[in-house]
Image (cartoon, grey):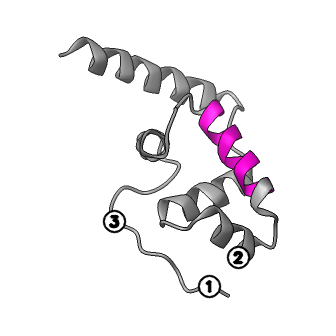
Amino acid sequence: MPKGKATELESTEELLESNSEGQSLTARQKEILSLVAQGFTNREIGEQLDISVRTVEVHRFNLMRRLRVRNVAQLLRQAIALRIIPQGPTTPTTKI
């Protein structure tokens, strides 16, 4: 196994352990993560949840910090690995 993959696997296992010890995401963070996974922009997420774009940005920043990732692709991969969001293609839902 390449060194990077081993390190990534260990990191995921550590996150799974910390997640099970009460370090889970808030309901709002999970909601925003789900919308990010569906391809919504920060503006669209803000409109759908009736919050400011800046609030969405803060939630995304906190999600990325908590899951120890640097970009959206890593965020989604880690969320799938931790079973926070389902694996597979998603499509944006109809806006309210």
Q: Nearer the viewer, residue 20 or 25?
A: 25
Residue under label 3, please give it: 89
Residue under label 1, please give it: 95
Position of residue 52 measured from the top left corner of the image (x, y, whole percent): 81, 64
Say which amino acid is labelled 1. Lys
2 in relation to 54, above or below: above
Q: Secondary structure at mark 1?
A: loop
53 sits left or right of 8 in the view: right
39 in relation to 79, above or below: below
Indicate which disc, 1 or 3, sits on the residue closer to the N terminus. Answer: 3
Image-quadrant location for residue 7: top left
Say which amino acid is labelled 2. Gln
CB-based contact (under 8 Å), mark 2 and mark 1: yes
Say which amino acid is labelled 3. Pro
Task: State how far apart marks 2 and 1 are (Cα).
Answer: 7 Å
37 in relation to 2, above or below: below
Q: Nearer the viewer, residue 25 or 32?
A: 32
Q: Which mark is residue 48?
A: 2
The residue shown at (17%, 16%) is 1
Position of residue 40 measured from the top left corner of the image (x, y, whole percent): 55, 68
46 sits left or right of 37 in the view: right
1 sits left or right of 42 in the view: left
Q: Secondary structure at mark 2?
A: helix
The residue shown at (26%, 11%) is 3
- For the record, the magenta segment spans 55-66
The residue shown at (49%, 39%) is 71
CB-based contact (under 8 Å), mark 1 and mark 3: no
Indicate which disc, 2 or 1, sits on the residue closer to the N terminus. Answer: 2
> Of the residues tagged 3 and 2, which is closer to the observer?
2
